[in-house]
Image: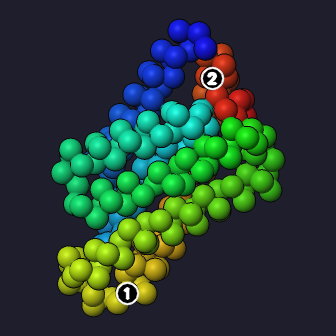
Amino acid sequence: MQRSQRTFKLVMAGLLCAIGILVPVISPVKIDLEPASFTLASHVALFIAMFLSPKIAAAVWLGTTLGFQLAGFPPVVVARAASQIVFVVLGALWLRRHPDTLRRPVQNALFGLVTGVVHGLCEVLVVIPFYMAGSMSAANYNKGFVVSVILLVGLGTVVHNLVDYALAQLIYKPVSRIPQVKAVAAVGRL
């Protein structure tokens, strides 16, 4: 790989990390229903990184997870961010192997849904120990396990994933036309 491509990938990963950390911190569009929290576009940087390459996706995941820790987010939020490595790496590897996924409507929709289900399942699995340990707010226990963990975290994450996936594609479409992006991207131009 040429030096300029390596530098470009590093810069893209850094910019996407910054975006991935800033969006949850400064976004005015937030829904907080503990233990779930939904910030519009908070996964967009991860999806764009997935469109580029598995290595960039993993770097952005690591950067955003560490950023949440350093920004002082609650442990359950940091743990949920850490669990995203599963859907991020699996999705990025799928896109590298099947680069036409985003250009085919049925496969594109299925990809969004499958990543959403994997994402939601991972977040549920991470929240369960916090819930069982009694380390969450009383409101979570008043709602019960099914509502707090399965519906709000699990199903809520699937819906949130689908919305952010659609936003990421809207943003990536014009970006994918930039020659440097085209040269390094796993999925190429949309």
Q: Residue at x 33, y 88 (%)?
A: 143
Which quadrant holds the N terminus? top right
| Among the two numbered marks 1 and 2 on one chain, the one whose residue lies closer to the N terminus | 1
User: Local crowd at mark 1 within 10 Å, few (<14), some, or many (≥20)?
Assistant: some
Q: Pinpoint residue 97: horizontal percent, then vertical percent.
A: 73, 41
Q: Are marks 1 and 2 in contact (CB under 8 Å)?
A: no
SS under mark 1: helix
Q: CA distance from mark 1 to mark 2?
A: 44 Å
Q: How is the image coloured?
A: rainbow
Q: Is residue 146 visible?
A: yes
Q: Residue furthest top?
A: 3
- Quarter occupied by residue 38: bottom left
* Amino acid residing under circle 1: Phe
Q: Is residue 102 above or below residue 153?
A: above
- Quarter occupied by residue 175: top right
SS under mark 2: helix
